Image (spheres, rainbow, N blue to C red):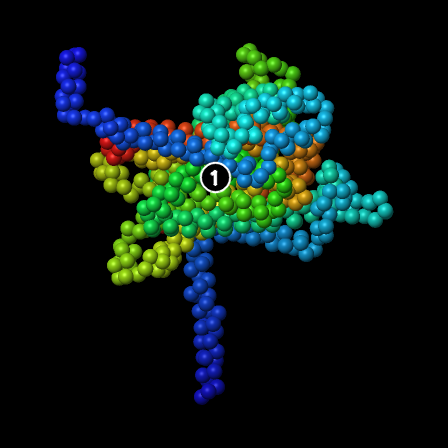
Amino acid sequence: MTENIAPQIQQDLARGGWGQFNEERVTPIKKYALRNPSLIVGLVLLFGMLFLVGIGHVLYDTEQFRPLSAPTRLGPTLSHELRDGTTAAFPFGTDTQGRDLMAVAILGTPLTLRIGLIAGAVAIGLGTVAAFLAAYYRGVVDGAIRSVVDVGLAMPALLILILVRINIGRELSTDELGIAIGLTSWVFPARTIRSQVLVMREQAYVELSRLSGTSGMGIIFKEMLPNLIPYITASLVGSVAGAILASIGLEAIGLGNLSDPTLGMTIYWNIQFSSITLGMWWWWLPPLAAIVIVFVSLFLISSGLDEWSNPRLRKRV
Amino acid sequence: MTEQTQAVENSSSSNGTSISQIIMGVLGHFVVKRFLFFIFVVWLASTVIFIIPRLSGQDPVKEKLLLEAQRGGAMQTGLDEMAKSYQKRFGLDQPLWVQYTNFLKDLAKLNLGVSIAFFPRTVNDIVFESLMWTLGLMGTVTILAFILGTLAGAILGWPRRPGWLQYVFMPLLTLSAIPQYLLGMILIFIFAFKLGWFPLFGGYSPATVPELTLSFVVDVVKHAILPAFAIIFSSIGFWAIGMRGMMINTQGEDYMIQADAKGLKGSRIFIRYAVRNALLPQVTGLALVLGTIITGQVLVERVFSYPGVGDILFQAIRLSDFFVIRGIVIVIVLGIAGATFLLDVLYPLLDPRIRVRNS
């Protein structure tokens, strides 16, 4: 008898294990991916690039990102004879100052993303707190935060950063740059999230929660925040993209950290030595391609998240 | 006529309209309210600009002068005169609040000070000259991109569009994710370096003198084409996305269903009902973007070495010309706050709902 049951149990177990998981989890994701391809394509693009960069980190000697560590003005080559007779590979070539551009690309891409993530997290964190304080407590708090936001919107973050950076008078590390960008760019998310909270505040379920005696903090954390998470995530992606744009902008006009091989600094050196007119396409192409991939993937992810957080768009994507 | 107005005045004064009531009435008017807010924003922003250098405990003027003195050379001759001029002009040895009120007084007269690197040229002079280039190119191109992008978005968001259109617009939208200056670099490489169709950099050929002749104008237009295309290509998508979203939002509205039920022509519903209503947030966006074109395009100008505000800003940063940087920041703040003010005043003309609420 038991011998007959055993295969049945095994089958059940199989279905209850991976089979059930497949039905309950994977199939909806597959369906969603088909309906919302931009989110998936964006994520694949971004993580695909990070994967390649990760492989490069493990397999490639990235010490030669510094100037004067390689021969200068070398096109992409797989076997270059060095002065001591040995050969070395420079798949991405070298620049006028003797950096190995492959090493620069491998180190610079995650560094720039890191600036964006730090700045985005700071901006969305501050923005969300300010938005909830303003929209939930209204009155004087709202008035004060709103005037700060209005003034902040009239002063481009890039310019405040330029003023601060000039007056600090020293180079900022990449993490400091990220924090500084975050501190100057929280006003826009604060404004958009505030209006979302204002709408939500009047909804019936929030009203009900208030009537049943939930405290202000309870309503914010249990009722409002969970419902805003899709929107906040979409804003975060937007903020990260904006912060990367700002960081590259700051670096390209010469206010970055000259010793860091970020994408923005590589663009700065390109402009400084006018690599385009020198015909050194291998110098500007990798950072440009990396920046384009970062922005296109973030754009796709954010429009995918928009579709997720705004059901009105869902019907017609 | 005069009797009538007199009678009105008499009756109003007999009704006891005091001056304070009139003042309250004027202050209550939304245009005045918005103008006061404009002044407030400019004041607060200038105060921040005034405070930031003081917080760092460094004196950009002194440092710059010291730097120049160490370097010696041509700058040495003007040094004493320059230092005196600064002490007189800014009263740098005076108490902080005197400096502050002087700064605000100068600002009220739109006097932005004197350049350190190009002494004795004034900041007003330098900024105004470059502003012409920036506004001429960037302003035109931004409005062009707005019109093209809004049109594209309107068609994209219209359910009765031909199906193949979405394949045309998707690449354009993706293009908008690429920063303008990078697109500029690609355009320079292809059309200026490889093909040689357009000049590599600058606002006009180095050998020519700016003047109003046909050949100079042609020269300027030739230099402007590549930066213009870089900006148009990358911002069409931005406008298209916003417009498309608003067009979709109008679809479920009652007035759209009514227009359809009335049997109106599709083109009329499209223009008079859908586009007319979806356009409002786009106009808000345009005003905000027009306020920021000066900074938004700093890097485009840098990549093309275009002689606009962005290029001046870059030069000023390189030469640590603090007063020019500060002047540009103030001009930009004025631009954005001014654009917001104009928008607030003009918006009721576009949106009757706001008009009702204001009156």
* A130 to the left or right of B78: left
Secondary structure state at the residue bearing disc 1:
helix
* Image quarter in which the N terminus of chain A is found: bottom left
Q: Is residue A282 above or below residue B194?
A: below
Q: Residue at x 55, y 24 (%)?
A: B89
Q: Position of residue B266 (x, y in %)?
A: 30, 34
| Nearer the observer, A164 or B195 | A164
Q: Residue at x 48, y 86 (%)?
A: A3
| Nearer the observer, B355 or B10 | B10
Q: Is residue B259 above or below residue B221?
A: below
| Nearer the observer, B37 or B355 | B37
Q: Position of residue A271 (x, y in %)?
A: 64, 33
Q: Chain of mark 1?
A: B
Q: Residues within 10 Å of mark 1 (few under 14, many from 20)?
A: many
**What type is the residue that disc 1 sits on?**
Leu
Q: Residue at x 62, y 19 (%)?
A: B205
Quarter of the image holding residue A140? top left
State whether residue A215 appears in this view: yes
* B283 to the left or right of B122: left
Quarter of the image holding residue B62? top right
- The residue tagged 1 is B173
* A142 to the left or right of A6: left
In this view, the residue farthest toward the bottom is A1
